[in-house]
Image (tube, grey):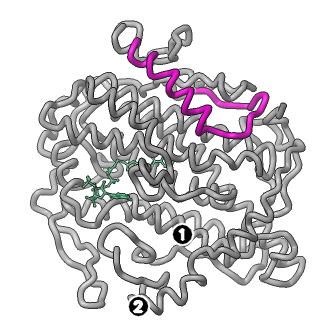
Amino acid sequence: MSLSADYTDRIPNNVDLRGDRRLQRALEAWQPRFMQWWRDLGPDLIARDVYLRTAISADRDGWAHFGHIPLEEYRWGIFLADREPDRRIAFGEHMGLPAWQHVPGEYRAELQRLLVVQGDTEPASVEQQRLLGFTAPSLYDLRNLFQVNVEEGRHLWAMVYLLHAFFGREGREQAEELLMRHSGSVDAPRILGAFNEPTRDWLAFFMFTYFTDRDGKFQLGTLAESGFDPLSRTCRFMLREEAHHMMVGTTGIDRVVRRTAELMREHDTDDVRRYGGIPLDIVQRYLNFHYSVSLDLFGGERSTNVANYFTAGLKGRWQEERRADDHRLTERTAAVDVVVEGRIERADVPALTALNQDLRSEYFTDCNNGVRRWNRILEEAGADRTLSLPHHGFNRRVGAFAGHWVTPEGALVDAPTWLSREPEWLPTAADFDHVQSLMKPVFEPGKMAAWIAPPATGINGQPVDYEYVHLT
Ligand code: BYC
């Protein structure tokens, strides 16, 4: 049975906020600060109204409502997926015990850290994307940008709820700080690297929603396994919204690749720059960048943090319950990459410390599906070119490859060699300039910028030329 949402409250929720006056008051005090942050650092382009999906209940069917509303009137709410009766901890040293409904005292610090890191990424992405509305390639895309933004805001609410409800004064302080750190700030940057990188243009936005939101899918998937039941339920609900964000990335890159292939065929050249397209070389360099910074989000190949999270029952593996092993892993080893004397080798380490790599390899498989899809589009269009994921050691700042110079093919080279070839592999100033030169807004219903193909379908059964956004 699903708890229905209470929309009469200032903060819509299915957690019975009314039953806990103190918590309700604390969250109501945080709400204006959130709104101030949204006005200061949320989308800069102000639209009259936007065709948005709003979460209204935890039911699988009919969990969302669609309609035109001003962005500021979006109802950021708190929703947890339904509680599974008799849910048990599925891994680690407490395996088999009933899932915790309260924070176990001995894991308070670790759990709080996980929530803060997760919470920090959500507003960061909104900040990174705040200017993109001005250059949207269509009203359909503008609507999708805003949808992603309001839902990342809601995901911030999800973490703030947990911090307020379960971590007392410290949790409330951490919730304040989530609004005080800012993407790219020198004094108070966001916690994880990728969330301080600028999202300059729409190609970067599609790459971000493909690669970085996909890290979100996998990290949320591991937190959905958590023995701390409120976190698990929160993440299960967030994953439902997250699927749309990745659809935006996947189909966004589909459409760029499709348009580029059309221009290549029409003009019989790879250099579609002068025909208003984005050459595949640039697409590949953007892909190399976004994939490699997203790999850093998985942490080191060897990590005692992740071993502790798993053993404690706080963070599981991707699809933990489908794994055919003892779910404790205390006796197992796993091979991880190490760089030894100028060579990439494999070393056996305790499996528990290799869990970041385990998750990263699941992520790799998923990312590769996109690459296969884009290559199919290229093949069908008769283009004799392919895209590929760079080697996982390429351009890394975190883990075994940090400080090493690895080519996209996986060869270790010296710094001067790597740096001399960097312009072949990572976006150059000229690439950014070219993509920026194409970023002209197209705000007429049904019309698309010339560098991107139209989507195959609209949103929620609406046609592509629907007026998804009414500007002023
Ligand atoms: N940048 O033991 P290590 C999303 C730190 S995205 C900067 O190797 P660990 C979204 C690390 O914190 C998903 N610092 O790694 C997407 C640690 O510091 P402390 C976000 C980094 O801890 C799009 C030290 O280095 N959710 O939802 O096993 C739009 C040693 O680290 C980085 C989560 O990440 C980095 N890239 O794993 C919107 C889930 N990497 O503790 C939203 C929660 C590592 O020694 N977070 N460090 O001071 C976690 O599970 C883990 O903290 C990490 C790192 C997977 C991030």
Assess disc 2: are there few (<14), some (14-19) or many (≥20) residues with their C-alpha within 10 Å of its C-alpha: some
Q: Position of residue 124 (x, y in %)?
A: 50, 45
Seen in the picture, residue 55 relative to 303 is either above or below; the reply is above
Name the residue that disc number 2 marks.
Answer: 413
Which residue extends farthest front? 187
Q: Residue at x 89, y 77 (%)?
A: 266
Identify the mark nearer the N-term, 2 or 1: 1
Asked which secondary structure carries label 2, the reply is: strand
Between 79 and 419, the one lying in front of the other is: 419
Name the residue that disc number 1 marks.
Answer: 289
**Horizontal side of residue 156 vs 353, given as left or right:** right
Q: Position of residue 380 (x, y in %)?
A: 75, 72
Between 383 and 185, the one lying in front of the other is: 185
Q: What amino acid is labelled 1 in the image?
A: Phe
Kindly identify which numbered label has been placed on residue 424. none
Q: Position of residue 460 (x, y in %)?
A: 72, 35
